[in-house]
Amino acid sequence: PHYQYMPIFESPAMLPLHTRYEDLARVKEALEAVSGRILNIRVGGNDLSHAFGLRRSVRDTIYDVRPVADLLVDIVTTFSTQYVVSGPVWEYYSGEGWEEGLRRELSLDLLSGFIGKTVIHPNQIPVVNDMLKVSRQDYEDARDIAGWSSDRQLLVSSSTDATRMNEYKTHFRWADKVLHLARTYGIRGA
């Protein structure tokens, strides 16, 4: 049968700094045999926090748990150019501050290169889907950048709202990702 895979990175075996990079590189090489069938790579933020005996509060993000954050960034750095790597579980789904905390962590997930979020409760789904929508400005700029051809005289221009510079060489991959997210999740305010 044609299986699809979703590797989960949550083992404390990844903690030792002296072997982490080599271990991650070996795993990436081993995944090459099934790379076209990998749907997503997940990370276990809570499992990794457990290895250190730590747990974040509703006021903290996984990025405030520095030993875990550093490991998560190493995983994204190793795998996100080839695979979708989703952000770790946010363990809160009700009570004061849970939604604000989830939004804050998701914002940092996206800024760090994660796409998506593992959810553990139905309350989290609409929040995650909303956060994965792209802004109108990002969508317009991404569409503009993706439409440029290499024979165009200048591959640099002002953004559609004239607030930032767009450059084909440095923003094409970003534009591709934004357009994919817009097709999947939509555009905020559309």
Image: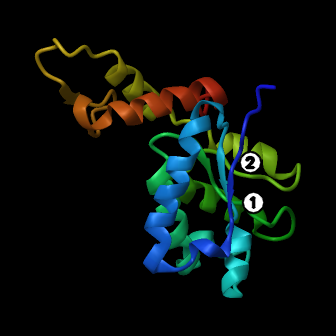
Say whether residue 15 is left or right of residue 158.
right
Say what secondary structure mark 2 lies in: helix
Vertically, is 89 above or below 114? below
Q: Position of residue 130 (x, y in %)?
A: 68, 41
Asked if marks 2 and 1 touch (Cβ < 8 Å), the reply is yes
Q: Quadrant of the C terminus?
A: top right
Q: Which residue is mark 1?
A: 99
Q: Position of residue 175 (x, y in %)?
A: 40, 30
Vertically, is 75 above or below 174? below
Vertically, is 154 above or below 77? above
Q: Nearer the viewer, residue 100 or 85?
A: 85
Q: Nearer the viewer, residue 98 or 90?
A: 90
Q: Nearer the viewer, residue 135 or 80?
A: 80
Q: Amino acid at mark 1?
A: Glu
Say what secondary structure mark 1 lies in: helix
Say whether residue 142 is left or right of residue 63.
left
| Number of other residues with Cα within 10 Å of mark 2, as a class: few under 14, some 14 to 19, many 20 or more | some
Q: Give the Cα distance between marks 2 and 1.
A: 7 Å
Q: Residue at x 56, y 56 (%)?
A: 109
| Number of other residues with Cα within 10 Å of mark 1, as a class: few under 14, some 14 to 19, many 20 or more | some
Q: Earlier in the sequence, mark 2 or mark 1?
A: 1
Q: Amino acid at mark 2?
A: Val
Q: Position of residue 43 (x, y in %)?
A: 66, 59
Find residue 59 and name its label. none
Task: Determine the residue located farthest toward the left in the rendered image.
Answer: 153
Q: Quadrant of the N terminus?
A: top right
Q: Residue at x 59, y 30 (%)?
A: 36
Find residue 127 and name its label. 2
